[in-house]
Image: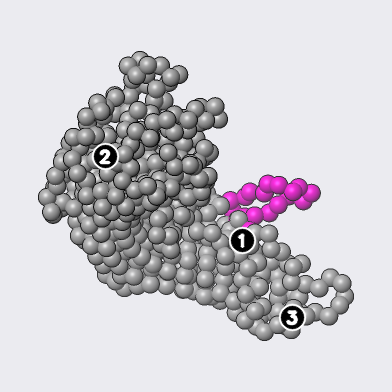
């Protein structure tokens, strides 16, 4: 990923500001000489209006009339630094960027508002050379009780030092840090490890930031109310994430490269999201004590080594020990290259570890097109790299409890209707006794003609599968769904955060 790609991905993960970038001062004034009815509204409503304005317009409301004079100072501050950038006169697009001027504007806003600071989002400035301003900001944020803080060093250098005073913002409820070198928590200037450091913090995002494993463990140990933790775009350090938390509900390893994700003890963890960036680095995923884990994925058959308790799950496993299952998981997402026989075997082995899964997502990684140009099977296997699985493989696969008695919905994403994909689909349909819906999402790289041919092929192939349940709905998506996003993956109000819905109802084969 290039710099622009990294920044675009990083910014897409940041929380959305509560203030409106299109709101402006004229929206709260009367320009027709008539009665000023807005100023007659109660203070609480007017503070709500002020909080939704860009910071510079919110501050200017004090000039409207005596009625407005104290409202901005008595409204918890909402600051987004991009709203302080100067747009050149006569231009509709683009901003005039001066790093020192922007830093000065942020300093003036933070100094002039008495607090508390409800929301401070600083992500538009390169902090190289702004060390004095940064130190001042953090002192003000600590003193005036910041609740939500987004602090990103744009765009570089990666090794810009984040002051240890960030660890003294005890009022924080939400914290996102981006493109920093995290302070060494083992040094004397760091607060003692314990729940008093971040007693109210509920959401933490560490984005493209260098930190040691001990610093991450320190943050988790110091955040007794933490609900959501995200490691975003992490390539260098930490290389291992160890999760021990009595409060965490959601962990996201998003577009990161790690050697190990270890859920040691997380009694309230409901969701573990793993979204890779397509590299071949092997990552061990260890699941220890997580009795409420409900949503898990994407587990990748090529790059992930799954360990449950002390048992490593290998390809070809037909039985798993009772202590090597996670019965709490209801939604499971897997990523597999159906053109590699060993990955298909690993897919079946993984599924045996989650006997109570009700919704199964399987994404085809499609590294190469399967069965290009409709050549005969042998030539297609050679041309596409697909290792065709012999038909008896599926018959000899053995029972998989969740498929036979639990799975109600199956989503096959980036489906190309290759021979192995069809074999897997027939396997699921033939064995699933309570299956209600199958969602097929065709590979977005397929041309409309290829998609039409694929659906025709599907219609001719599936009747050979003996379906236990005659009430299965088939949903076809000839076009790709909306992109899966960090916001969707982290939304705990969604029982299933993986892409699945939409499309057109296909006639049951």
| Label disc, if present, on residue 347 of the rendered structure | 2
**Residue visible at 60% across and 64% down?**
19
Tell which residue pokes out farthest to the right in this image: 33
Residue linked to disc 3: 39
Residue 316 visible in rendering: yes
Q: Which residue is mark 1?
A: 105
**Callout 1–callout 2 Cβ contact below 8 Å:** no
Judged by depth in the image, the label closer to the viewer, 1 or 2, is 2
Q: What secondary structure prevails in the magenta region?
A: loop
Observer-side mark, 3 or 1, equals 3
Left or right: residue 142 compared with residue 272:
right
Residue 449 as seen in the image, left or right of residue 143: right
Image coordinates of residue 261 in percent, x first then y, are 26, 49
User: In the image, residue 54 lies at what x, y percent?
Assistant: 64, 64
Whether residue 298 is visible? no
The mark nearer the N terminus, 3 or 1, is: 3
Q: Is residue 446 above or below residue 85?
A: above
Name which residue lies at 29% across and 50% down: 433
Mark seen at residue 77: none
Above or below for 67 versus 378: below
Real-space Cα separation, disc 2 to disc 3, in angstroms? 64 Å
Q: Nearer the viewer, residue 348 or 4?
A: 348
Quadrant of image for the C terminus:
top left
Q: Are marks 2 and 3 in contact (CB under 8 Å)?
A: no
Residue 95 percent coordinates (x, y): 67, 49
The range drawn in magenta is 83-102
């Amino acid at each position: 990923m290039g710099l622009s790609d990294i920044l675009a991905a990083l910014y897409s993960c940041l929380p959305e500001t509560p203030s409106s970038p299109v709101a402006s001062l004229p929206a709260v004034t009367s320009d027709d000489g008539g009665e000023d009815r807005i100023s007659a509204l109660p203070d609480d409503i007017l503070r709500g209006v002020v909080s939704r304005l860009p910071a510079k317009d919110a501050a200017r409301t004090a000039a409207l009339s005596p009625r407005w004079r104290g409202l901005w100072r008595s409204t918890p501050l909402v600051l987004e630094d991009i709203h302080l950038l100067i747009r050149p006169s006569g231009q509709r697009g683009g901003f005039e960027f001066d790093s020192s001027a922007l830093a000065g504007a942020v300093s003036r806003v933070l100094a002039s508002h008495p607090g508390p600071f409800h929301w401070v989002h600083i992500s538009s400035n390169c902090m190289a050379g702004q060390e004095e301003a940064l130190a001042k900001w953090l002192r003000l944020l600590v003193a005036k009780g910041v609740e939500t803080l987004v602090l990103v060093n744009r765009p570089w250098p990666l090794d810009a030092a984040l002051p240890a005073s960030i660890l003294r913002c005890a009022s924080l409820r939400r914290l996102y840090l981006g493109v920093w070198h995290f302070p060494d928590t083992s040094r004397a200037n760091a607060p003692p490890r314990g729940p008093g450091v971040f007693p109210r913090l509920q959401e933490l995002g560490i984005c493209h930031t260098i930190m040691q494993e001990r610093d991450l463990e320190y943050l988790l140990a110091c955040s007794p109310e933490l609900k959501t933790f995200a490691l975003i775009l992490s390539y260098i350090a930490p290389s291992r994430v160890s999760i021990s938390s009595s409060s965490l509900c959601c962990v996201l390893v998003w577009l990161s490269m790690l050697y190990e994700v270890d859920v040691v003890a997380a009694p309230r963890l409901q969701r573990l999201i793993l979204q890779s960036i397509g590299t071949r680095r092997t990552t061990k995923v260890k699941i220890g004590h997580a009795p409420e884990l409900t949503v898990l994925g994407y587990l990748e058959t090529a790059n992930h080594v799954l360990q449950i308790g002390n048992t490593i799950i290998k390809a070809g496993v037909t039985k798993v020990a009772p202590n090597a299952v996670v019965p709490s998981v209801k939604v499971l997402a897997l990523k597999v290259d159906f053109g590699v026989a060993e990955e298909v075997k690993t897919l079946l082995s993984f599924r045996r570890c989650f006997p109570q899964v009700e919704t199964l997502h399987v994404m085809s990684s499609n590294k190469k097109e399967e069965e290009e140009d409709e050549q005969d099977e042998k030539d297609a296997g050679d041309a596409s790299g697909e290792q065709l699985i012999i038909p008896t493989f599926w018959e000899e696969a053995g029972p998989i409890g969740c498929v036979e008695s639990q799975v109600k919905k199956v989503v096959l994403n980036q489906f190309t209707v290759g021979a192995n994909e069809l074999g897997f689909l027939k396997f699921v349909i033939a064995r699933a006794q309570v299956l209600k819906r199958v969602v097929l999402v065709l590979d977005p790289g397929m041309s409309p003609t290829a998609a039409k041919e694929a659906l025709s092929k599907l219609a001719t192939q599936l009747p050979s599968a003996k379906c236990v349940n005659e009430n299965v709905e088939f949903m076809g998506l000839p076009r790709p769904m909306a992109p899966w996003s960090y916001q969707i993956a982290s939304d705990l109000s969604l029982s299933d955060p993986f892409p699945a819905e939409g499309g057109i109802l296909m006639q049951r084969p």
